[in-house]
Image: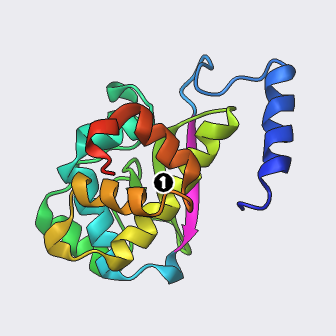
């Protein structure tokens, strides 16, 4: 997907040029990113759900949605810890589709977190957030699931996630390290 950036830039630019809208459309519009369920362990799912719950205000900023829209379409904190563990072990089945990490699809995990966008930097920030969360959850201990460890992870790998890093530099410079 990173190699296709020029094509995405052309497509998104053409959409804007032709009057298309995304986040400011008359109806709510989000960017949903699907990832293969087969690449996610139960532990990885639990870590991502846990950080969404613990760091709700941070991920609200990253999502660039309004709080009411995030709650309606991509809730970060609907489940309690025992429910999260059960969902992660099953790798599916949330009773509520409108969670930030939707596990109801048969073969994919759906990140419903992001506000829609036709801006290439924000589009790639969203994709890189998913990529970074997956990489971070693979490596991070369950005992250290928090915003600080995620920010440190992105800072150390800023070349891998340039659009995400740029966004976080704008919004969390003091916490980003360095």
Q: Could one spot residue 24 in this view of the protein? A: yes
Q: Could one spot residue 103 in this view of the protein? A: no
**Residue 72: x %, y % from top left:** 37, 34
Left or right? Give the position of 101 relative to 164: left
Q: Which residues are magenta?
A: 30-36
**Residue 108: x %, y % from top left:** 54, 69
Look at mark 1 in the image and give the residue it sits on.
Answer: 129
The answer to which quarter of the image holds residue 107 is bottom right
Residue projecting furthest to the front = 178
| Above or below 35: residue 99 | above
| Above or below 151: residue 91 | below
**Residue 177: x %, y % from top left:** 30, 50
| Above or below 125: residue 132 | below
Identify which residue is drawn at 63% across, 42% down.
123
Identify which residue is drawn at 40% across, 47% down.
98
User: In front here: 144 or 29?
Assistant: 144
**Residue 104: x %, y % from top left:** 45, 64
Q: How many marks?
A: 1
| Quadrant in the picture for the N terminus | bottom right
Left or right? Give the position of 105 relative to 83: right
User: In front here: 106 or 56?
Assistant: 56
| Above or below 84: residue 59 | above
Identify which residue is drawn at 22% across, 47% down.
55
Left or right? Give the position of 13 relative to 57: right
Q: Does the stretch in magenta take in 31?
A: yes
């Amino acid at each position: 997907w990173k190699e296709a950036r020029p094509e995405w830039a052309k497509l998104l630019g053409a959409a804007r040029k032709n009057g298309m809208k995304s986040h400011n459309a008359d109806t709510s519009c989000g960017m949903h990113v699907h990832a293969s369920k087969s690449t996610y362990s139960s532990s990885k799912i639990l870590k991502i759900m846990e950080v969404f719950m613990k760091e709700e205000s941070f991920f609200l900023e990253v999502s660039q949605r309004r709080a009411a829209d995030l709650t309606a379409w991509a809730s970060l904190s609907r489940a309690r810890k025992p429910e999260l563990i059960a969902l992660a072990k099953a790798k599916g089945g949330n009773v509520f589709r409108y969670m930030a990490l939707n596990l109801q699809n048969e073969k994919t995990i759906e990140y419903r977190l992001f506000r829609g966008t036709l801006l290439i930097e924000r589009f790639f920030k969203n994709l890189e957030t998913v990529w970074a969360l997956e990489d971070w959850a693979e490596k991070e201990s369950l005992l250290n699931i928090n915003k600080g460890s995620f920010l440190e992870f992105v800072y150390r790998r800023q070349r891998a996630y340039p659009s995400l890093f740029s966004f976080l530099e704008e919004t969390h410079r003091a916490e980003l390290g360095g």
